[in-house]
Image (cartoon, rainbow, N blue to C red):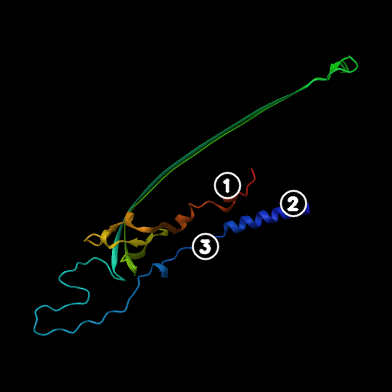
Amino acid sequence: MKRLWVVIVSVGAAFLTGCVTGPKPQPGDPYYAPVVTTRAHEPMNTSGSLYQSKQGMTLFTDTKARNIGDIITINLTERTVSSKSAGVNVTKASSTSLPGGTLLGMTPTLNGNLLDTDISQDRDFEGDTGADQSNSLSGSIAVTVADVLPNGNLVVRGEKWMTLNRGDEFIRVSGILRPEDITTQNTVDSTRLANAQISYSGTGELASSQNMGWLSKFFNSAYWPF
């Protein structure tokens, strides 16, 4: 009885540990907040010339994002399709014959029945699994340049929160961009993001209604022995 209680407590503790989740996403996460840099000193006006230079702008540059704090629009063009199937078929058959033999030249019997024994066994197992999944995400989100790497690539990240009816929805994007992939409109496709991390989810009543209850999670988890 004591061992049974130990097993029950162990399984319960493991189940509760698996149910522990991290903090819910909240707007204003410092990781996705824009990086603010110190404003550079404006050069003094030069008298005697019609052209007055401005910090970061010349006649030979465009308006592409290249500095920390600049804004880039990410066009979300994500689509993934996956399919998986597996089949297992195991068959085993065995047969054993044990003749009764003879004793002193006579065939022994028991209540008139011979002692010959035949044992046969057949075992068959067959299992099939299959999974199909398709996801797509389209839209756009403006992100900011958080860092400029030594090779010139840009580390970008940002988030967008939308309050719809009874809950919030959010999109979070982070990754690394090559300046060459940025268009003249200061946009870039999400497929150009290296080390991309794209999250689309929600909070509130509508999002919670799509989650499985804790008891259903237990019956569909690896802890359920049947």
- x, y percent for residue 168: 41, 60
Circle nearer the N terminus (3, 2): 2
Q: What is the crowding at mark 1: few (fewer than 14 residues within 10 Å), some, or many (at least 20)?
A: few
Circle nearer the N terminus (1, 3): 3
The residue carrying mark 1 is 220
- Type of amino acid at the residue the image marks with label 3: Gly
- x, y percent for residue 219: 60, 47
Q: What is the crowding at mark 2: few (fewer than 14 residues within 10 Å), some, or many (at least 20)?
A: few
The residues bearing labels 3 and 2 have C-alpha atoms spaced at a distance of: 31 Å
- Type of amino acid at the residue the image marks with label 2: Leu
Residue name at image x 33 percent, y 56 percent:
190
What is the secondary structure assignment of the residue under circle 3? loop
Tell me, for residue 4, which label it has, or none. Answer: 2
Q: Is residue 30 left or right of residue 192?
A: right
Give the answer, above or below, for where 142 lies relative to 79. Answer: below
Please identify the quarter of the rendering in which residue 52 is found. Answer: bottom left
What is the secondary structure assignment of the residue under circle 1? loop
The residues bearing labels 1 and 2 have C-alpha atoms spaced at a distance of: 22 Å
The residue carrying mark 3 is 22
- Type of amino acid at the residue the image marks with label 1: Asn
Circle nearer the N terminus (1, 2): 2
Q: Is residue 80 left or right of residue 95?
A: left
Nearer the observer, 126 or 117: 117
Q: Is residue 37 left or right of residue 59?
A: right
- x, y percent for residue 226: 64, 43
Tell me, for residue 110, which label it has, or none. Answer: none
